[in-house]
C-alpha cells in the first residue's frame, strides 16, 4: 500500500511539474571538489549555495561522469557516457565540435518543447567542422546554436587555452577585421611574446605546457596571434558571464527558459577581480570559490526580483573533482591549510579515485523539493532523462541512452537512485555499486597535491594489477584497503557490469598521455 501511495504522490508531482513547466538552470562549476562547498564541510563561506541546499536536496552520492572537463560536459548535455564518443577527451582550443547536431542535446530537446535556451560560460566541446579548418574571423559553426542553444556567450575551450576571446552567437566579440585571429597548437604563429620567451611579462608564473602566448599577463596553452581588441581580461570574466546570464533571465521571465551557466571558477588561471582578491585564506583558489558562490547568489537574487525563483529548478554541481596545482604557481597547495577539497574521498581531477568524479550535487525547486540530504546514487548523465520526465515529454529516440529518469530522487520524493554508476578518467573507467567500488586493471593517474597530506606537484600513476581493486567505500573512503582477494564473487559482479555497459573497457588501458591532457 505504501509503495502504491508513493507512486501516486510521485505521479502527482510530475503532473504538477508538467502544468507549470519550470525554468531550469544548470550552474556548472569547474574543478570544484566535493569538499569545496560549505554544506559539504568546506572552509570557504558559500552561503548562497548552502541556502539553495537548505531548500532542496544535497546528494552525498552525486557524480559527474568523468574526472576531466570535456567528457563530463558532453555527458551532461547528451545523456550519454563520453567513452562512447572517442573524441570526447580534453580538447585543444581549436578542436572541431564533438557533439553530433543530428542527436538532440538537452538544450535542443527543451528548445523544441517551448523553452528559451542559453549558454553562458565555458564550452570546451569543440567548434566547427572536422573536415574544414576553422576560421575564427567569420561565422563559427557548427557550435552551441547547432546543438540547441538559441543564445550563447562563451569561450572556445578553457581560460588557459587560446583563443582567449569571447564568442557570442557564433562570432568573436569585438574582433577587428584588420587584426585577424590565428590559432595553432602544433607550432608558433605570429610574434606575440610567450611565457617561456618573456617570463618577465607574466603576473602569474606557469609551467612549460602553459607557457605559450601571453594574454593579459598570463601565458596559455597554445599559440595565438591577432584579435588584440577581442582578447578577454581574466579579472572581468566572472562578471561578464554573470551579466549575460542575468540579461537572459530578465528578457525571458515571461517564458520558460533553460540556462546553462558554466563559469570559469575555479579552473586555472585563477585570476579573480580585485574585489575578491584575499576574500579567503586559501589564496586564489579559495577566492575563486567565493566568486562562484557570489555568482549563484546574484542569479538567485535576479530570479526573485523577476518573480521566477519559485518557478525555477536549480542544479548546482561541478564537471570533475578538484586540483590544487594545474600549471600555474598560485600557492593552491601551500595555502590549503586544513581545507580538504575532495572531502573524505581520495584523489581528484584526472583520477579514477572517488574524488575525481564524486562532486557537490544540489537540486532545488523552491517549494517543490522535499528538503534533505540524500545518499542516493545519481549522475549528471541522468539529468536529461529526468528533465524529460519533469516536463512530461518523451525522450528523443536517438539521445540520452545512458541516463535514467530520477526526478523523484532529485526532488527528494524517492530514496533510491541508480543501482550503479560508471566513473571515467582519461579513457579508463571504474564502477560503483552500492557501497562497493571496483577499479579494473590498468593505471590510476593523478595530479599530486590534491589532498592535504600530498605535498608537491607533478604526476603519479598507480599501476593496477589483475584482478583489479575492490573497496568498501563506507568503511574505506580513501580507497586503501583492497578487498579483491577477499570477495572474488563481488569482483566478478562488478566486472560483469563493465562488460555489459562498456565491453571495450573490460580490459584495462594505459593511463596518462599528452593527447588526453590537451597538450
Image (cartoon, rainbow, N blue to C red):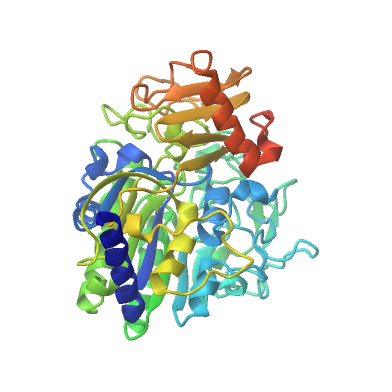
Q: Closer to the camera, 324 or 354?
A: 354
Residue beneath the point at 70% across and 48% down: 86
Residue at 46% from the left image edge and 52% from the top image edge: 380
Q: Give the camera-side residue of 242 and 76.
A: 76
| Above/below status of 262 relative to 323 | below
* Residue at the limit of the structure toward the right, as seen here: 131
List x then y, in percent, for residue 384. Answer: 48, 62
In the image, residue 233 above or below residue 208: below
Q: Is residue 188 left or right of residue 379?
A: right
Quadrant of the drawing holding the C terminus:
top right
Q: Position of residue 172 (x, y in %)?
A: 58, 70
Would you identify the image quadrant in which residue 512 lies? top right
**Quadrant showing the N terminus:** bottom left
Indicate the position of residue 453 as horizontal and vertical percent values: 36, 19
Question: In the rendering, at what x and y percent does residue 362 appear?
Answer: 31, 53
Residue placed furthest toward the bottom? 254
Q: In this view, does 113 lie to the left or right of 518?
A: left
Q: How many labels does the image show?
A: 0
Q: Can residue 67 be seen in this view?
A: no
Say above or below: 277 vs 329: below
- The foreground one among 225 and 20 is 20
In the rendered image, the residue lying farthest to the top is 485
Q: Is residue 517 visible?
A: yes
Residue shown at the point (21%, 45%) measured from the top left:
45
Front-most of residues 463 and 200: 463
Measuring 41% from the left and 20% from the top, which residue is drawn there? 455
Residue with the most extreme front position: 1
Q: Is residue 126 above or below residue 59?
A: below
Q: Is residue 283 left or right of residue 220?
A: left
Amino acid at each position: 500500500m505504501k509503495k502504491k501511495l508513493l507512486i501516486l504522490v510521485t505521479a502527482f508531482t510530475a503532473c504538477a511539474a508538467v502544468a507549470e513547466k519550470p525554468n531550469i538552470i544548470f550552474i556548472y562549476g569547474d574543478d570544484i571538489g566535493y569538499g569545496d562547498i560549505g554544506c559539504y564541510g568546506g572552509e570557504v563561506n558559500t552561503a548562497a549555495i548552502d541556502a539553495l541546499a537548505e531548500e532542496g536536496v544535497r546528494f552525498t552520492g552525486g557524480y559527474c561522469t568523468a574526472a576531466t572537463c570535456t567528457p563530463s560536459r558532453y555527458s551532461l548535455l547528451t545523456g550519454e557516457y563520453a567513452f562512447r564518443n572517442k573524441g570526447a577527451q580534453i580538447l585543444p582550443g581549436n578542436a572541431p565540435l564533438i557533439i553530433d547536431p543530428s542527436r538532440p542535446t538537452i538544450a535542443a530537446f527543451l528548445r523544441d518543447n517551448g523553452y528559451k535556451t542559453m549558454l553562458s560560460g565555458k564550452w570546451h566541446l569543440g567548434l566547427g567542422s572536422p573536415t574544414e579548418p576553422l576560421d575564427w574571423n567569420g561565422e563559427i559553426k557548427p557550435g552551441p546554436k547547432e546543438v540547441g542553444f538559441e543564445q550563447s556567450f562563451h569561450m572556445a575551450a578553457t581560460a588557459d587555452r587560446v583563443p582567449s576571446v569571447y564568442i557570442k552567437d557564433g562570432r568573436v566579440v569585438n574582433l577587428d577585421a584588420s587584426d585577424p585571429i590565428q590559432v595553432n597548437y602544433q607550432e608558433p604563429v605570429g610574434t606575440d611574446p610567450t611565457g617561456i620567451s618573456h617570463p618577465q611579462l607574466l603576473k602569474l608564473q606557469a609551467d612549460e605546457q602553459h607557457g605559450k602566448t601571453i594574454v593579459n599577463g598570463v601565458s596559455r596553452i597554445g599559440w595565438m596571434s591577432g584579435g588584440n581588441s577581442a582578447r578577454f581580461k581574466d579579472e572581468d570574466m566572472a562578471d561578464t558571464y554573470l551579466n549575460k546570464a542575468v540579461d537572459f533571465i530578465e528578457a525571458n521571465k515571461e517564458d520558460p527558459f533553460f540556462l546553462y551557466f558554466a563559469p570559469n571558477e575555479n579552473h586555472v588561471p585563477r585570476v579573480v577581480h580585485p574585489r575578491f582578491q584575499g576574500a579567503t585564506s586559501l589564496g586564489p583558489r579559495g577566492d575563486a570559490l567565493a566568486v562562484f558562490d557570489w555568482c549563484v547568489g546574484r542569479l538567485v537574487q535576479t530570479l526573485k526580483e523577476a518573480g521566477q525563483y519559485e518557478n525555477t529548478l536549480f542544479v548546482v554541481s561541478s564537471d570533475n573533482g578538484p586540483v590544487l596545482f594545474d600549471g600555474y604557481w598560485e600557492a593552491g597547495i601551500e595555502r590549503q591549510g586544513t581545507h580538504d577539497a575532495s572531502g573524505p574521498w581520495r584523489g581528484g581531477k584526472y583520477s579514477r579515485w572517488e574524488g575525481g568524479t564524486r562532486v557537490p550535487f544540489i537540486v532545488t525547486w523552491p517549494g517543490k523539493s522535499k528538503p534533505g540530504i540524500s545518499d542516493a546514487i545519481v549522475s549528471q548523465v541522468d539529468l536529461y532523462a529526468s528533465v524529460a520526465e519533469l516536463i512530461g515529454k518523451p525522450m528523443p529516440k536517438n539521445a540520452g541512452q545512458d541516463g535514467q529518469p530520477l526526478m523523484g530522487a532529485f526532488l527528494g520524493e524517492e530514496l533510491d537512485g541508480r543501482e550503479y554508476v560508471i566513473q571515467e578518467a582519461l579513457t579508463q573507467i571504474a564502477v560503483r555499486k552500492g557501497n562497493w567500488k571496483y577499479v579494473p586493471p590498468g593505471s590510476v593517474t593523478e595530479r599530486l597535491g590534491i589532498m592535504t597530506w600530498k605535498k608537491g606537484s607533478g604526476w603519479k600513476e598507480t599501476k593496477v594489477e589483475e584482478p583489479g581493486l575492490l573497496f568498501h567505500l563506507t568503511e574505506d573512503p580513501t580507497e586503501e584497503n583492497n578487498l579483491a582477494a577477499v570477495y572474488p564473487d563481488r569482483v566478478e559482479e562488478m566486472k560483469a557490469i563493465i562488460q555489459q555497459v562498456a565491453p571495450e573497457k573490460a580490459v584495462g588501458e594505459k593511463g596518462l598521455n599528452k593527447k588526453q591532457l590537451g597538450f
